[in-house]
Image (cartoon, rainbow, N blue to C red):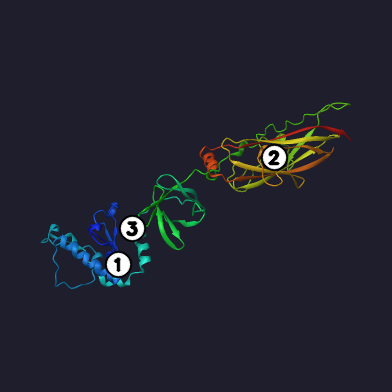
Amino acid sequence: MRLFLALDPSLYNAEKYHHRDYTEVARYAKFPFMIKLSSDRQVKYAEELIGEVCSQSRLVRDEGYVVRDQANIFKKPKRRKESQPVSEIPPAAVLEIPFAAVSEMPPAAVAEEAAAAEDLEAIDVRLPVRAKLVNKQGEEVGKIRNSVWLDEEEQEQGVFKKEDTNVFVYAGETRTGYVDKNDNVLSLDNKYVATIRRGNRAWVLFLVLFLVLLTLLTLFLTAYFLRRSEADYAPVLFIATEDGENWEDSENLPVFLNERFGDSKIAPGMRGSYRFSFENRNANALLYALAFTQTNEYGIEVVYRLKRDGAYISGVGEYVTPEELGIGELTIEPHSATIFELEWYWRDNDEADTQAGENSAIYTLGISLTAQIGERA
């Protein structure tokens, strides 16, 4: 239980009364002196301080008054007597505190948390899942990942939890603060701690409509072939999806197809792969090369590896950029086929990802296959 009094907190010894100053909190401006009734001694101090409020209001103690429980006066409103005008009733005399009930209150820590929760008005705040934490100067002092507050050393400082409309901060099972409507993190006694800076994260807008995703590009700048000694001819190239659909019949390739968003969106941290086949229907072996390009205005980090018939041929040690992924001097025998698997991964990069998400960026990957005639079978 907490008691708020119309006294100046600065005039009283804090080491004695253990009170708090709520002067800067608008709702308590008229009674800024707060004392917790957490022990018999605090109750005695509270009675003493109530006496001072009464003295300042020129109220005299009624020595003949018998203490009794006044809770039932709140059950039904009572009519005022005609003979007693409202103006004659001293405001301070209306309140009677049943001090005999103090011994039944919960432990101090529980009482403080319950009181703070009761005083806090409903604030409809969105639960922070991924964001930065900054101080009043705008300097980064931590971050939020999966609603967990981490400091600059990656040490957990608390967890954000949504309860009804409000968002509270917990340290273990103890509530330590809350988030206000301006995304400020405050302690339970309304002291500023930090500010949440949310970004329109790419994965929330799911940013990047890889729709044009392989606007296929140059797709097959297909076959530049060399002349042969006996006759020149353009080799026939057949490149198809895993299901056998010819690339020439596709406007965009579903390279980034995923169960969560389909083939038009992906998010930071996601992985996937795309399989396609290359078939040589010619009488000659072919020499060919694969090249990859990207349109990536905001520099998000989508990286790749490439397999041929189950074995890595590019990005063997780790994922590489599209420009590093290309490979040449490959051969394929006549009337045979080979299977490629393109693996992709979107690496987290908070700054680039946030900027791309805020601008609804579009990312495009281009694949180019060039071939020339090898030796006749």
Counting residues from the start of the chain, the first of labels 3 and 1 encountered is: 1
Name which residue type carries label 1. Answer: Leu
Q: Give the alpha-carbon distance from disc 3 to disc 2, as whole Å.
A: 60 Å
> Horizontally, is 34 left or right of 147 in the view?
left
Nearest to viewer (mark 3 / mark 1): 1
* Numbered mark located on residue 62 in the image: none
The front one of 170 and 282 is 170
Query: CA–CA distance between discs 3 and 1?
Result: 16 Å
Q: Quick one: quadrant of the N terminus?
A: bottom left
Residue at numbered disc 1: 37
Q: Is residue 135 visible?
A: yes
Q: Which amino acid, mark 3?
A: Asp
Per the image, the residue denoted by label 3 is 119
The quadrant holding residue 362 is: top right
Rate crowding at label 1 as few (under 14), some (14 to 19) or many (20 or more) other CA atoms within 10 Å. many
Q: Secondary structure at mark 3?
A: helix
The amino acid pointed to by label 2 is Leu
The residue positioned 77% from the left and 29% from the top of the image is 224
Q: Name the one closer to the observer, 135 or 189.
A: 135
Q: Nearer the viewer, mark 3 or mark 2?
A: 2
**Label 2: which secondary element:** helix
Q: Going by the image, does 239 lie left or right of 200?
A: right
Q: Position of residue 96 (x, y in %)?
A: 22, 66
- What residue did someone put label 2 on? 325
Q: CA distance from mark 2 to mark 1?
A: 70 Å
Q: Position of residue 132 (x, y in %)?
A: 48, 48
Label 3 Cα neighbours within 10 Å, binned few <14 / some 14-19 / many ≥20: few
